[in-house]
Amino acid sequence: MGRYLLRRLNLFIATSLVLIAILFFATRLFPAELNYALSGIALPTSEQQLQIQHDFALDKSTLRQFFAYSAERLSGNFGISVTSQRPVSGELLGVLPASFELAFVAGLLALIVGVPLGVISALSRSKSLQKLIMAVTLTGYSIPVFWLGLLLSLWFGVQLGWLPISGQINLLYQIPKVTGFMLLDTLLFDGTYKWAAFIDALQHIIMPACTLAVLPFTVVVRITRTAMISVMNQTYIRAAEARGLSNTSIILKHALPNALIPLLKHLGLMLGPFASYAIVVEVIFSWPGIGAWLVSGIYQRDYTVIQGGIFAVALVIIFFSILIEVLYTAANPVSRKDMYGTN
């Protein structure tokens, strides 16, 4: 098991170095002075100029510059934002929790709704119900996320006025940041408007979370359906039926846990598209996450923000992809031999 985890760690390190190398060479293609693109300081003083040259080894060979660039970025030094004149690392830490909160709620919605529908579609004897569920999932998979987000905003936000269409919480509520997760921070807040703020934060996250949940929801339904059909035909399921176990017990204790294993693998493969969808959703609903922050930096040609945002998003995808692969290998008896080094 230790060798397997070490291989996964080496894969994470190697992939991260490739990512840094791409950013290193891309930085030199920016239409700006190299010092400015690396540090974000437009008019550095002579001391700042020398410091930048020393930190990034600009007077050394390209290889030395790459190692210096890697060391600075891995240490959290992304320079300062051209727009706000604040450290990029600090801004990253400020916007990441909002993105994680939105992704968590969207993923939870997709699982809560998608898994039962996948099971129903697999076990139902009604062809009409099966076709209806698959038609809904196919429609959801085909709808462009930006169009769906704008449509929900128009219907439920503008015309009906049921839900807010932008932001994370009403600015009237002054909620101190403890965890960065607004829903959790409102619950931790000890004030007279605690529950009002929680309800308001919940209303703000409903539309962006539902919009973002559409893609994983369709994948969850299709994979769960296919896996359940396969599992229900296995010998141990028929043996459980022969012992007289109830259908509910067979499904919940034997079939569903094994059907969720292939779903775990596909969730790892979906992280890239999910992250790109999240960026679009954050822009549409003005959600204060890393996606909206990165797009704003691109519009304003904030080169340090662009580097920091791309590095953070890509690193999160790499990390969770490898983590899900490890969990899948641990949960799947067929693949578990790779973890323990057996043939």
Image (cartoon, rainbow, N blue to C red):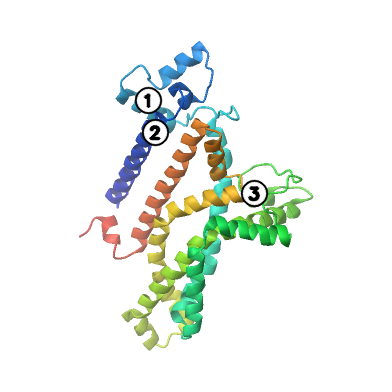
Is the residue marked by circle 2 packed among few (<14), some (14-19), or many (20+) residues within 10 Å? few
Q: Which mark is residue 68?
A: 1
Residue on which the image places disc 2: 26
Nearer the camera: disc 3 or disc 2: 2
Where residue 325 sits, quadrant-wise, is bottom left
Nearer the camera: disc 1 or disc 3: 1
Determine whether the residue tagged by mark 3 lies in a helix, strand or loop.
Answer: helix
Residue 315 image position (x, y, % from top left): 42, 43
Determine whether the residue tagged by mark 1 lies in a helix, strand or loop.
Answer: helix
Is the residue marked by circle 1 packed among few (<14), some (14-19), or many (20+) residues within 10 Å? some
Asked if marks 1 and 3 touch (Cβ < 8 Å), the reply is no
Residue 338 image position (x, y, % from top left): 26, 57
Q: Is residue 271 above or below residue 238?
A: above
Front one among 247 and 57: 57
Q: What residue do we see at 53% from left, 57% from top?
A: 145
Front one among 287 and 265: 287
Q: Amino acid at mark 3?
A: Met
Where residue 329 sits, quadrant-wise, is bottom left
Q: Amino acid at mark 1?
A: Ala
Cα distance between the residues tagged 2 and 1: 16 Å
Q: Which mark is residue 306?
A: none
Residue on which the image places disc 3: 182
Q: Is residue 80 above or below residue 3?
A: above
Determine whether the residue tagged by mark 2 lies in a helix, strand or loop.
Answer: helix
Q: Is residue 180 above or below residue 1?
A: above
